[in-house]
Image (tube, grey):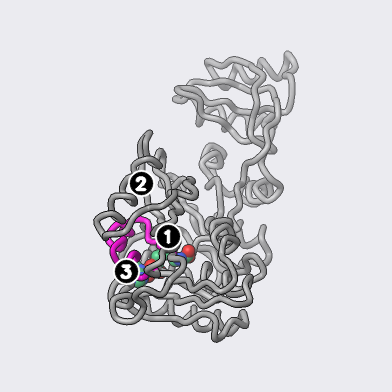
């Protein structure tokens, strides 16, 4: 599950101040107790819009004028803060300079009892306090992790710093009626892919053999086995910790015998053991999947099957480019795309960069 701290919009009076006066203005609004803490401060070009509780009296206007040399009063739409965001703010309010409260992380990912967030540079000195605020607000959270690197390496995991709570970050995450034991510091898992796991699992038909080439702790494989009575899934991963959790998850979800975990490089595993037997292939290694199209084609039955191809891409033609790359890769591997069944953006991974999935029927 991911938690977006800001969601719906509300109209409110606000102070519009030039950005260079932003810190001074936020301090003044806090000192005069006129700020609306239910709403989020906005940055628009070179200005800050600071929501206030309502129209200001003449006396309040004079006080604001004494504190801020230049401002305007406007009515504007602001994103509302959810209750938990307000309670994080309440916890931190008297412990941090008010202008820094505006930079608090906008979203938190929850992987079981572990909360994961990004601490902006200007808040690094307050990271432990922010971690404590998260622990206080979400009673089920046992550890709060701050991202300290991007996702990287063969195992696609990032580095984290524990900023509050337990050092033991192993947890159990629940998704679509399945439970996944995992440690986000040892194996890849993203709660933001939950719908994608379900979308693919829903397309599987009775009797299929599926190869999940980059299976992680098993969120595609296990859900497929849980949702369908008569399927066989080979779940490959190169990370021994991911496979260890996958084995545990197979038992925890009662799908033993339907999901076969295989430790190794997907290309080698297919070459050595799984040629020509799959009806469906899942290729969720977006930064490198292009290098495995030949293996995926080798793994498909001679009569054909379906490939779910994940890729990162940017720019205005991102989806088209990924589709073209897949079609070409399949042709190089001496197979053909019969139909592109679906193409969709799975999630934004950076500004103007997306994870994209193409579902293709291959013959
Ligand atoms: C982006 S994660 C996806 C995990 C899982 N499918 C999910 O949705 O959570 C990619 C996984 O591929 C694994 N991996 C990377 N290179 C691999 C390779 N050559 N062969 C098999 N697995 C690999 C990583 O260890 C990682 O667990």
- The crowding category of the residue bearing disc 3, from other C-alpha atoms within 10 Å (few below 14, some 14 to 19, many at least 20), is many
Q: Give the range drawn in magenta.
A: 282-300
x then y, percent, for residue 312: 37, 50
Which picture quadrant has residue 142?
Answer: bottom right
x then y, percent, for residue 170: 52, 76
Circle 3: element type: helix
x then y, percent, for residue 295: 30, 67
Which picture quadrant has residue 173?
Answer: bottom right
Q: Residue 307 carries which label?
A: 1
Residues at marks 1 and 2, CA–CA distance in whole angstroms:
13 Å
In which quadrant of the rendered image does the C terminus lie? bottom left
Task: Tell me the residue that label 3 is attached to.
Answer: 298
Task: Tell me the residue that label 2 is attached to.
Answer: 322
In this rendering, would 145 be left or right of 76?
Answer: left
Circle 1: element type: strand
Q: Earlier in the sequence, mark 2 or mark 3?
A: 3
Task: State the residue at coordinates (44%, 50%).
Answer: 339
Nearer to us in this view, 2 or 178: 178
């Amino acid at each position: 599950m991911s938690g977006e701290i800001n969601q719906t919009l509300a109209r409110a009076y606000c102070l519009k101040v030039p950005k260079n006066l932003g810190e001074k203005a936020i301090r003044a609004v806090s000192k005069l107790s006129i700020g609306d803490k239910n709403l989020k401060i906005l940055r628009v070009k070179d200005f800050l819009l600071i929501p206030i509780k309502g129209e200001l009296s003449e006396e309040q206007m004079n006080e604001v004028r004494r504190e801020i040399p230049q401002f305007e009063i406007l009515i504007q739409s602001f994103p509302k803060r959810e209750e938990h965001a307000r309670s994080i703010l309440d916890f931190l309010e008297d412990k941090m300079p008010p202008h820094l409260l505006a930079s608090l992380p906008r979203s938190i990912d929850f992987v079981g009892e572990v909360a994961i967030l990004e601490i902006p540079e200007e808040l690094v000195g307050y990271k432990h306090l922010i971690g404590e605020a998260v622990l206080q607000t979400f009673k089920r959270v046992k550890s709060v992790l701050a991202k300290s690197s991007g996702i990287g390496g063969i195992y696609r995991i990032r580095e984290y710093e524990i900023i509050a709570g337990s050092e033991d970050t192993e947890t159990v995450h629940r998704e679509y009626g399945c439970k996944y034991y995992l440690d986000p510091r040892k194996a890849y898992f993203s709660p933001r892919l939950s719908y994608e796991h379900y979308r693919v699992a829903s397309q599987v038909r009775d009797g299929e053999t599926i190869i999940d080439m980059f299976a992680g702790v098993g969120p595609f494989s296990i859900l497929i086995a849980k949702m369908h009575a008569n399927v066989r899934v080979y779940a490959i991963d190169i990370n021994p910790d991911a496979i260890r959790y996958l084995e545990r998850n197979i038992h925890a979800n009662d799908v033993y015998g339907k999901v076969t975990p295989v430790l190794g490089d997907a290309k080698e595993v297919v070459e050595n053991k799984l040629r020509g037997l799959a009806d469906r292939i899942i290729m969720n290694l977006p930064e490198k999947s292009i290098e495995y199209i030949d293996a995926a084609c080798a793994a498909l039955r001679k009569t054909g099957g379906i490939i779910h191809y994940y890729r990162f891409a940017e720019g205005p033609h991102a989806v088209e480019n990924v589709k073209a790359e897949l079609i070409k890769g399949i042709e190089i591997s001496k197979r053909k795309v019969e139909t592109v069944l679906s193409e969709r953006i799975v999630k934004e991974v950076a500004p103007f960069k997306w994870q994209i999935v193409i579902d293709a029927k291959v013959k």
